[in-house]
């Protein structure tokens, strides 16, 4: 039976896995498209991009936006998203689980499509900055599902990817793990439908932080 003892490093996605950001991200991309007069993507299109770098998200959510207007788009997105971020909640039970893992001496990291600035902001806001040994963003790595972020974590930690467990809510997270030779667990409350996550063959499908705790036998 699998337990936390089978892994030397635990890599978490952020958006939709630790922080409940999905609806705010979706409506912010839609707002920017509408304000600029471009077709508004439906929820599923935006949801499918969560975890990618912001530029890749933009190119999928708003393919008609020319590169010279990207900065305008991002400014509109940010103006809509940031006020909502202030009211977002961590996934129920996730903070306690992360703190318990850290206290137990387990090594934790983040692999996210967010920017460095965005991660610094939210880690400080929620008081989690001391829990993660390595925080890898799309600013410094290739976007998921490229395994670049996991390779960077391996370089930081000295842990082989084969001894990592990736915890995420999207197929991008699980594919990144596969591409690096890491194992994965899918959280089913976030960006991707459960049946799509199942197709990626994660070790487990967990519907809550408590289910993840039980899977890890913590």
Image: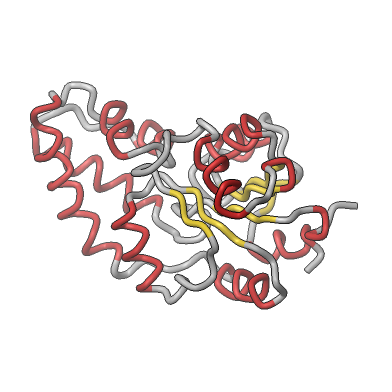
Quarter holding the C terminus is bottom right
* Residue 83 locus on image (x, y percent): 21, 64
* Residue 60 locus on image (x, y percent): 31, 27
Determine whether, in the image, residue 167 is placed left or right of residue 71: right
Whether 206 is drawn above or below 199: the answer is below
Q: Report which quarter residue 179 is drawn in.
A: top right
Whether 125 is drawn above or below 45: the answer is below
Identify the residue at horizontal 60%, vertical 52% (top origin). 11
Whether 123 is drawn above or below 103: the answer is above
- Nearest the viewer among 1 and 106 is 106
Identify the residue at horizontal 9%, vertical 40% (top origin). 72
Q: Residue furthest right?
A: 1
Determine whether, in the image, residue 28 is placed left or right of residue 139: left
Q: Report which quarter residue 80 is drawn in.
A: bottom left
Identify the residue at horizontal 46%, vertical 50% (top origin). 136
Q: Report which quarter residue 200 is drawn in.
A: top right
Determine whether, in the image, residue 142 is placed left or right of residue 55: right
Q: How many marks?
A: 0
* Residue 170 locus on image (x, y percent): 54, 40
Please name the colour scheme applied to the rendered image. Answer: secondary structure
Identify the residue at horizontal 55%, vertical 52% (top origin). 156
* Residue 57 locus on image (x, y percent): 32, 34
- Nearest the viewer among 160 and 103 is 160
């Amino acid at each position: 039976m699998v337990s936390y003892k089978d892994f030397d490093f635990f890599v978490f996605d952020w958006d939709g896995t630790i922080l409940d950001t999905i609806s705010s991200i979706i409506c912010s991309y839609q707002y920017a498209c509408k304000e600029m007069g471009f077709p508004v993507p439906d929820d599923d299109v935006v949801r499918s991009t969560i975890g990618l770098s912001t530029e890749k998200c933009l190119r999928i959510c708003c393919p008609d936006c020319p590169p010279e207007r990207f900065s305008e788009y991002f400014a509109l997105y940010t103006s809509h998203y940031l006020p909502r971020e202030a009211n977002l909640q961590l996934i129920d039970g996730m903070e306690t689980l992360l703190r318990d893992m850290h206290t137990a001496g387990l090594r934790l990291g983040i692999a996210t499509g967010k920017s460095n600035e965005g991660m610094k902001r939210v880690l400080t806001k929620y008081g989690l900055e001391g829990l993660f040994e390595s925080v890898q963003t799309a600013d410094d790595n290739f976007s998921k599902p490229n395994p670049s972020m996991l390779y960077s974590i391996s370089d930081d930690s000295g842990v082989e990817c084969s001894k990592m467990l990736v915890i995420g809510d999207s197929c991008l997270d699980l594919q990144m793990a596969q591409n690096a030779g890491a194992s994965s667990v899918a959280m089913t409350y976030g960006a991707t439908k459960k049946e799509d996550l199942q197709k990626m063959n994660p070790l487990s499908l967990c519907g809550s932080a408590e289910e993840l705790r039980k899977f890890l036998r913590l």
